[in-house]
């Protein structure tokens, strides 16, 4: 049978679907989850990539691998960096040596002890293997293991993001005996609180069973964690209501229906930032962007409140900043900058010599589609004419990295602030496409990398953020939020402070 | 007949080789982008080169293709670029999910469609009008809508059937049947509708033919006239409709798999092409070509068995 999609049928479907949804919201008999409270059944939208430590990817897939592997450090639900597999860590005074001390008595799921040699083997392997995280260890010169529990990282230069990196992808500890075997990619041996069960179906359902012999077993209340890959948002809601799931994030349109069906809901105001990156700050491929006045004018072209209301249906906040509002770099005072003012924007463009505006090409990516008409219109109002170049999904990364586009739209999930500063602003940062630099910024970056005092570092991060806003290095538009829904016995503990998806964000309620 | 089948099978294999070659050549244009996608924003020209060497993508394209082909004919389709899952077993298991839905749907379509069509054509009157309006309604209802209604009623409110997910038949036959029930119904409704209309039409045509009158004058029972003679002649065009329905169901399965979160062939192929997962795309292409070729062959063979005029020598 063909799925017929002529306009009439589509309209019919929409109409009937609306009717069904309307009936469902009053008719569902208190659709509480029937799933056992000892089981966390969580939905994610995409299947995880390889679990090979050198190929791990951030995002919702880390629910699986962060449960199988222990990372050296961790970020707790309040966003604080905490000991994990390493019970302590400290920097030398010059910031060029990081010493970590492993906890005693940790074992891999194979029964072998976790030693400093395993940490060294995993780190050195990640440093030597082409993969998405290798650059996070770029500052590391050598890894030394003076004894079974001590790891000493000697750095080429101080790196303020390294400890946070060790709390995520590059901080995992793999079992050196199996690291280079085939099983590592699909069913790795780790020392984490869970092991993958045989009932796992790759790409569809990941079943994690708790290890009672894990050193921190009591911190993980669920005996079983089931992570199901459900791409379709309606299917997620159906699975919640039929009791197949007891935790998932859903779209704003479904929240009321689920709440009235007896689910707990929690809204995280910001978990990603949508920004028009004005990447070509020296005007190499898009000359006008080299002029600060043009970049400021672009920032004034957007009616951010309206965009949040209409395109995000209120599930977010307007913003002028790139960084997590719960993180160190955020400064509420900066939100006063760049109010919606097309007239002043046009004046600024005229001063910069672009009274008649200019034309720009931007890549049309799968996540930019909903925003394209609004962006075209907003920029059109101040005289900037946008052409969207269709870009196949598998080319998204390379389209942005190609330096073909001076500006482009990004919707980026948050990371820890030190990591984000490095990614967006360091001259070799992966999201600093044109390697932009500035003497003032560079001095701030050097200082924050060497800063050991968290309070002073936080102050520096705020100054770095202020620099990017004042110099209009980007045109952030909105923070997008996420609605979490949990069933009987399950509670979502996060508040947006920790940006790393992990099963630690779920607890037992009641 | 046997030689004919063999010849068709050989043509199918040649077609598979050609299609995969073209697919590979087209994919080879984006190898750099795909490798960059896997390395993420932090990719450097050096790491892209290193990973291309790792994956064997630094060799001439034709060498790569024939290397793939020589492994593929031995059943080794390589491993996914992104998950490292072996492609052959992954495709097989996902095809199992899709086929269990499509095949069950097809059987249900044949049984119900033929029964309704024959009934409508022979009984006429109220039965015919009822069958026709049912068929028209079924044809007009979008299957996605049917799926949504069934999920809300049967899965969410009555909790009789699961709303999402798949249980393999080997694990638990009863739960397997429950997990495919709603998807199958969603697929079957409009297929039954078009098959019923087709069978009814050709049955009426056949029943008006001279040979039917002759058979009747010889005193052959109506039941035998209808089922053994008229239906056999009416089945040809219906079979063609059915083969289109089958190929269409494979496409429709993509939507059904998404709505019910089933780990099927359609979503697997779709996700792989979004990511540019070359080994999966190649594996999926092979299976898809072979499937279409064998369905068409099967239809031709059954057609020949039904109708001696359509036999090829």
Image: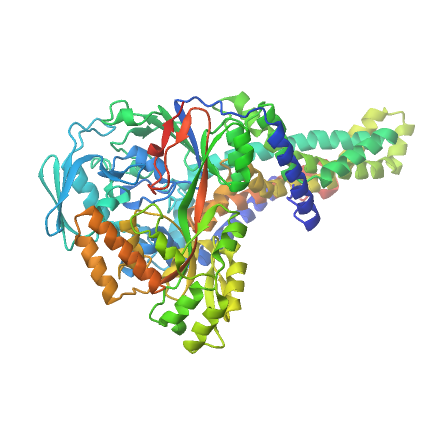
Q: Is residue B273 left or right of residue B32?
A: right
For the C terminus of chain A, the quadrant is: top left
Quadrant holding the N terminus of chain A:
top right
Which residue is farthest left? A146
Q: Residue at x 47, y 77 (%)?
A: A355
Q: Position of residue A290 (x, y in %)?
A: 36, 71
Percent of width and height locating residue A219: 29, 27
Q: Is residue B28 left or right of residue A447?
A: right
Q: Is residue B271 above or below residue A259?
A: below
Q: Residue furthest right?
A: B217
Q: Position of residue B96 (x, y in %)?
A: 51, 34
From the viewer's perspective, is A406 left or right of B118?
left
Above-or-below relation of B72 to B193: below
Q: x%, y% of residue B2?
A: 60, 39
Give A386 or B150, whichever is nearer the viewer. Answer: A386
Q: Quadrant of residue A484?
A: top left
Q: Residue at x 72, y 33 (%)?
A: B113
Residue A301 horizontal side relative to residue A503, left or right: right
Q: Is residue A128 visible?
A: no
Note whether A281 is above or below A43 in the view shown. Answer: below
Can you say whether A491 is above or below B56 in the image?
above
Closer to the camera in the image, A328 or A113: A328
Q: In the rendered image, which quarter is residue B158 located in? A: top right
């Amino acid at each position: 049978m063909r799925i017929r999609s002529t306009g009439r049928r589509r309209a019919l479907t929409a109409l009937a679907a609306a009717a069904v949804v309307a009936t469902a919201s009053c008719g569902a008999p208190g659709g509480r989850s029937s799933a056992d409270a000892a089981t966390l059944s969580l939905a994610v939208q995409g299947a995880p990539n390889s679990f090979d430590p050198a190929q791990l990817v951030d995002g919702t897939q880390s629910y699986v691998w962060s449960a199988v592997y222990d990372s050296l450090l961790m970020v707790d639900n309040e966003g604080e960096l905490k000991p994990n597999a390493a019970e302590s860590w400290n920097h030398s005074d010059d910031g060029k040596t990081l010493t970590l001390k492993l906890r005693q008595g940790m074992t891999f799921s194979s029964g072998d002890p976790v030693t400093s040699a395993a940490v060294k083997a995993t780190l050195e392997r990640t440093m030597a293997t082409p993969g998405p995280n290798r650059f996070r260890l770029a500052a590391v010169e050598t890894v030394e293991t003076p004894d079974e529990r001590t790891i000493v990282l000697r750095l080429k230069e101080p790196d303020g993001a390294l400890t946070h990196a060790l709390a995520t992808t590059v901080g995992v500890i793999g079992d050196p005996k199996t690291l280079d075997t085939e099983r590592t990619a699909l069913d790795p041996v780790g020392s984490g609180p869970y092991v993958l069960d045989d009932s796992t179906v790759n790409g569809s359902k990941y079943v994690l069973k708790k290890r009672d012999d894990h050193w921190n077993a009591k911190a993980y209340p669920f005996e079983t964690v089931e992570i199901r890959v459900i791409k379709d948002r309606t299917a997620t809601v159906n699975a919640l209501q039929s009791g197949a799931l007891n935790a998932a994030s859903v779209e704003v349109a479904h929240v009321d229906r689920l709440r009235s069906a007896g689910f707990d809901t929690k809204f995280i105001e910001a978990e990603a930032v949508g920004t028009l990156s004005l990447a070509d700050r020296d005007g190499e491929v898009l000359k006008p962007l080299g002029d600060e006045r043009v970049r400021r004018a672009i920032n004034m072209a957007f009616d951010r409140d309206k965009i949040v209301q209409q395109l995000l249906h209120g599930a977010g906040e307007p913003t002028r900043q790139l960084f997590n509002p719960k993180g160190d770099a955020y400064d509420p005072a900066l939100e006063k900058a760049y109010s919606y003012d097309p007239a002043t924007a046009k004046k600024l463009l005229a001063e910069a010599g672009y009274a008649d505006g200019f034309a720009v090409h931007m890549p049309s990516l799968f996540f930019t589609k909903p925003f394209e008409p609004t962006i075209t219109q907003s920029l059109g109002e101040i005289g900037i004419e946008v052409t969207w170049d269709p870009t196949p999904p598998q080319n998204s990364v390379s389209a942005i990295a190609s330096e073909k586009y001076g500006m482009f739209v990004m919707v980026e999930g948050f990371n820890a602030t030190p990591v984000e500063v490095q990614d967006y602003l360091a001259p070799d940062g992966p999201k600093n496409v044109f390697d932009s630099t500035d003497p003032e910024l560079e001095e701030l970056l050097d200082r924050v990398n060497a800063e050991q005092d968290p309070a002073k570092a936080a102050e520096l991060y705020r100054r770095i953020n202020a620099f990017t806003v004042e110099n209009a290095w980007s045109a952030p538009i909105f923070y997008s939020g996420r609605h979490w829904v949990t069933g009987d016995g399950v509670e979502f503990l996060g508040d947006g402070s920790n940006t790393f998806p992990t099963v630690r964000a779920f607890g037992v309620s009641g | 007949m046997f030689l004919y089948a063999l010849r068709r099978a050989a043509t199918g294999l040649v077609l598979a080789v050609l299609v995969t070659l073209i697919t590979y050549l087209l994919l080879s244009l984006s190898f750099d982008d795909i490798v960059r996608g896997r390395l993420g924003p932090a990719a450097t020209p050096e790491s892209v080169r290193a990973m291309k060497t790792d994956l064997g993508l630094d060799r001439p394209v034709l060498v790569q293709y024939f290397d793939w082909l020589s492994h593929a004919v031995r059943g080794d389709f390589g491993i996914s670029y992104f998950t490292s899952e072996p492609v052959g077993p992954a495709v097989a298991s996902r095809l199992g999910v899709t086929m269990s839905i499509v095949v069950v749907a097809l059987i249900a379509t044949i049984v119900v469609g033929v029964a309704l069509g024959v009934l409508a054509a022979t009984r006429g009157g109220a039965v015919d009008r009822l069958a026709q309006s049912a068929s028209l309604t079924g044809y007009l209802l979008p299957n996605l809508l049917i799926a949504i209604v069934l999920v809300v009623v049967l899965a969410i409110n009555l909790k009789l059937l699961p709303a999402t997910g798949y249980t393999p038949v080997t694990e638990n036959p009863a739960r397997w049947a429950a997990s495919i029930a709603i998807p199958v119904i969603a697929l079957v409704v409009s297929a039954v509708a078009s098959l019923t209309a087709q069978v009814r039409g050709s049955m009426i045509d056949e029943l008006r033919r001279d040979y039917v009158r002759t058979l009747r004058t010889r005193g052959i029972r109506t039941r035998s006239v209808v089922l053994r003679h008229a239906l056999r002649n009416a089945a040809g065009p219906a079979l063609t409709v059915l083969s289109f329905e089958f190929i269409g169901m494979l496409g429709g399965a993509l939507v059904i798999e998404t709505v019910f979160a089933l780990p099927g062939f359609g979503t697997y192929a779709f996700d792989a092409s979004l990511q540019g997962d070359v080994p999966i795309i190649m594996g999926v292409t092979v299976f898809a070509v072979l499937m279409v070729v064998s369905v068409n062959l099967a239809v031709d063979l059954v057609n020949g068995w039904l109708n001696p005029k359509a036999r090829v020598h």
